[in-house]
Amino acid sequence: MNKYKSLIIICFFLFTLCLPKAVANIKNLNLLGKTIVLDAGHGGVDAGAQSGLITEKNLNLILVKKLEQELISRGASVYLTREGDNDLSGTTTNRKKNDLYNRAKYINEISPNMYISIHLNSTTSSNWKGLQVFYTTKNKENKKIATTVTNYLKENIANVREIKKDNTYYMYRLIKSPGVLVEAGFISNPNDNYLLRQEEYQNKLVNLLVDSIEIYFQN
Ligand SMILES: [Zn+2]
């Protein structure tokens, strides 16, 4: 019996040793009270860009779901424009425009503190590379978000491009809430394509993006 008692005591002692570690692993809740909409580009019949082993719509959704988990773990309320392999179009004519209109409508209805659209870039030249953040001047916060995200990413990963103002995108001109479009890399570039398929890189990118979102809200 004494043997069991000592065993229980040892187990309890080991358990308490583990406690501070467990507490340390609980994330900060710095995003408590923040509502964020994540928009995975394309979906369904609209596959987006395709290069090598990457189909844009699928990877957009993978990144968005990882972002969702990370944001929730830091206290944010998160909404997704799509959770599966579908677009938001309700029509077959003007399908693309209708899809984009419905995404903007969804975001405006939620009126979040921030929206983030995730896309992947592709061009005919394989030389273009790197992540790039685009913003419209529709909301005055957009440039600040783009700058904060970009500056932070530049400190932590290679090939981050300069922010780009673009008021030509139909969808983003409709959205009143603050937010940006993140083109996470050029899948037409072999190195970007390879990196974006690595789960380790995906997780790193997602963590950095959420860190930068936190920094934006802290300032
Ligand atoms: Zn796209």
Image: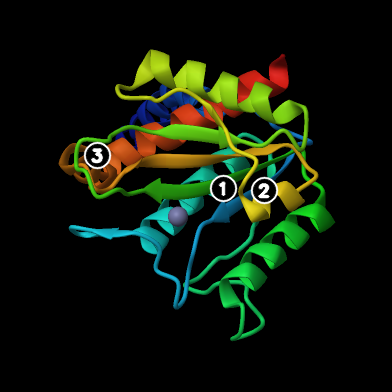
Q: Looking at the picture, tell me which residue is in the foreground, 131 or 124.
A: 124
| CB within 8 Å, label 2 to label 3 | no
Per the image, the residue denoted by label 2 is: 172
Q: Secondary structure at mark 2?
A: helix
Disc number lying in front (2 or 1): 2
Q: Mark 1 Cα within 10 Å, few/some/many (few <14, many 20+)?
A: many
Whether label 1 lies within 8 Å of ligand 1 gets the answer no
Gap in angstroms between the C-alphas marked 3 and 1: 19 Å
Q: Report the side of 171 relative to 192 (left or right).
A: right
Kindly give the residue lying farthest to the bottom in the view shown. Answer: 92
Question: Which residue type does callout 1 highlight?
Answer: Ser
The residue wearing badge 3 is: 192
Quadrant of the image occupied by residue 51 = bottom left
| Scheme of image coloration | rainbow
In which quadrant of the rendered image does the C terminus lie? top right
Q: Position of residue 22 (x, y in %)?
A: 48, 29
User: What's the residue at 83%, 57% (across, down)?
Assistant: 109
Q: Mark 2: which amino acid?
A: Tyr
Q: Nearer the viewer, residue 215 or 192?
A: 192
Under mark 3, the amino acid is Asp
User: Disc 1 designates what residue?
Assistant: 117
